[in-house]
């Protein structure tokens, strides 16, 4: 097979060269990071005052982990390492509100990120001849703009349609003979189920590839997508804290995702002990930025569980491959690509005076899409009131939730005592999405 590369030299560099680049860039990154109040304090505590204190890659282990909580506590500027004047873009994590995290990019950072995405795109065999329908949300979420810039660098014809509006998406796919999609796997399956409603058949479409990511999905889901739509689906992994998409991406061989190791140091750790695990062992993914200077993040605990493949990929790239994301170390739910913490839901519903103390969060599938149902117990006297009052309350809860978690939840009101109570730790979340 003729293997396509964006930057062959770097993508196939031997380990020694990669490690040399990593060390140089780590030093530079630390010198940038230390300009932020957060890292000045953290690095100072472990006796690091500049990049020069890093003598080998092993010295990375002297640095404590950074967590999402650190990002929240440093909001808005505690991790910013440059003057605002040098910042050309701000992104923020999905799930949003209440607990914001923000990432700053300089012009150079955007250039570097774009380059990584161009590599990802080209590694799947996509080219400037492709018509690229970017169905990920544009805006503060990194998915839309991230891939957009990469696709532009490759010279693809971009349709920056963003998320939602299924009928229009399908029509646009047909009108412009889209060849490559960027989309969440659940939404792609939903799109497939709606083709008939729009009166457009698969044969009228030119799609040949999809970049799917932003949410967990199994190999079987990928196979289902490929079979139903007769396309190749490539797994795409990233998180806003580390830029967004472009951290790891599958190449034409589709045997898990190359992590761009000249741009990120990837470690897999035992989340309990912090011990760094060898390749092949499953643990928490920890990432360090090497090419972002407006806000570098060192040793970020992603909470994602995966392992690194110890063997080489047939494509010739030397950058190690990360497995599919196998789970999370926390209780974060990903609902149609949007991150939601059960605590965000609890905080909102408990602010509503009519709501009692017991509630449950259900997640299941409606067709291919995820459905969130929030069941709440309300005080007894409310049940004796008018049905219209109950409807109004339901809508109010729904609106409150929508403003907080950006998801349309189904709200069910229950009489006191109707929801199961557990004697031990309350089981608030029931996730019934089948592990396809
Ligand atoms: P966000 O910061 O909103 O981009 O969300 C990032 C999180 O989404 C990651 O930490 C993962 O938990 C999840 N995620 C992103 N891409 C994938 C993927 N390809 N497979 C599984 N989970 C993913
Ligand atoms: Zn490969």
Image (cartoon, grey):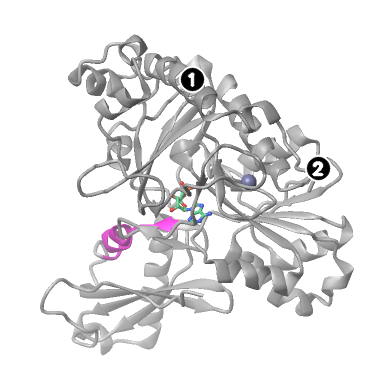
- Identify which residue, 28 or 254, lies in the foreground: 254
Is 347 positioned to the left or the right of 253 in the image? Answer: left
Which image quarter: residue 170? bottom right
Residue 313 visible in the snapshot:
yes
Q: Is residue 251 above or below residue 293?
A: below
Residue at the left extreme?
423
* Circle 1 crowding by C-alpha within 10 Å: few under 14, some 14–19, many from 20: some
Disc sitting over residue 214 in the figure: none
State yes or no: Cβ of the residue under disc 1 lies below 8 Å from any atom of ligand 2.
no
Disc sitting over residue 127 in the figure: 2
Residue drawn at point x = 42 percent, y = 21 percent: 26
Is 363 positioned to the left or the right of 65 in the image? Answer: right
Q: Count of labels shown? A: 2
* Label 1 residue SS: helix
- Magenta region, residue range: 339-349
Spot occupied by residue 157 in the image (x, y as percentages of width and height):
82, 43
The residue carrying mark 1 is: 20
Q: Which secondary structure dominates the residues rendered in magenta?
A: helix
* Circle 2 crowding by C-alpha within 10 Å: few under 14, some 14–19, many from 20: some
Residue drawn at point x = 17 percent, y = 81 percent: 421
The first of marks 2 and 1 along the sequence is: 1
Q: Is residue 222 above or below residue 310?
A: below
Q: For residue 381: magenta?
A: no
Spot occupied by residue 267 in the image (x, y as percentages of width and height):
38, 39
Which image quarter: residue 82? top left
Spot occupied by residue 124 in the image (x, y as percentages of width and height):
71, 48
Residue drawn at point x = 73 percent, y = 46 percent: 160
- Identify which residue, 238 or 383, lies in the foreground: 238
Spot occupied by residue 372 in the image (x, y as percentages of width and height):
43, 71
Q: Which of label 2 and label 1 is nearer to you?
A: 1
Residue drawn at point x = 64 percent, y = 38 percent: 117
Q: Is residue 217 above or below residue 153?
A: below
């Amino acid at each position: 097979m003729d293997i396509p590369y964006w930057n062959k030299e770097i993508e196939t560099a031997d380990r020694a060269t990669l490690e040399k680049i990593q060390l140089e860039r780590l030093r530079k990154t630390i010198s940038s990071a230390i300009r932020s109040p957060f890292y000045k304090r953290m690095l100072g505590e472990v006796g690091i005052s500049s990049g020069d204190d890093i003598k080998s890659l092993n010295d990375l282990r002297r640095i404590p982990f950074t967590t999402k909580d650190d990002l929240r506590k440093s909001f808005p500027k505690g991790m910013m390492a440059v003057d605002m004047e040098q910042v050309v873009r701000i992104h923020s994590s999905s799930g949003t509100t209440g607990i914001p995290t923000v990432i700053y990019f300089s012009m150079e950072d955007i250039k570097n990120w774009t380059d990584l995405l161009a590599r990802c795109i080209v590694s799947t065999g996509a080219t400037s001849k492709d018509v690229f329908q970017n169905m990920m949300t544009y805006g503060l979420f990194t998915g839309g703009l991230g891939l957009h810039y990469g696709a532009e660098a490759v010279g693809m014809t971009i349709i920056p349609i963003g998320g939602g509006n299924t009928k229009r998406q399908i029509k646009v796919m047909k009108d412009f003979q889209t060849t490559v999609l960027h989309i969440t796997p659940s939404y792609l399956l939903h799109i497939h189920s709606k083709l008939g409603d729009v009166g457009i058949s698969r044969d009228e479409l030119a799609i040949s590839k999809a970049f799917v990511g932003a949410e967990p999905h199994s190999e079987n889901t990928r196979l289902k997508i490929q079979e139903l739509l007769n396309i190749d689906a490539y797994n795409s992994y990233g998180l806003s804290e580390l830029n967004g998409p472009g951290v790891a991406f599958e190449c034409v061989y589709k045997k898990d995702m190359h992590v761009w190791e000249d741009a990120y140091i990837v470690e897999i750790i035992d989340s309990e002990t912090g011990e760094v695990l060898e390749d092949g062992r499953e643990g928490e993914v920890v990432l360090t930025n090497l090419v972002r200077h407006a806000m570098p993040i060192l040793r970020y605990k992603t909470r994602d569980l995966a392992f690194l493949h110890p063997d080489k990929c047939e494509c010739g790239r030397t950058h190690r491959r990360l497995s599919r994301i196998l789970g999370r170390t926390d209780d974060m739910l990903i609902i149609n690509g949007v991150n939601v913490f059960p605590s965000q839901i609890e905080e909102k519903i408990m602010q509503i005076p009519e709501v009692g103390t017991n509630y449950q969060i259900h997640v299941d599938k409606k067709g291919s899409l995820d459905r969130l149902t929030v069941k709440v117990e309300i005080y007894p006297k409310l049940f004796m009131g008018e049905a219209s009052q109950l409807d109004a309350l339901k809508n109010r809860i729904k609106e409150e939730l929508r403003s907080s978690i950006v998801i349309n939840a189904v709200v069910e009101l229950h009489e006191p005592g109707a929801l199961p109570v557990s004697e031990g730790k309350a089981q608030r979340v029931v996730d019934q999405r089948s592990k396809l």
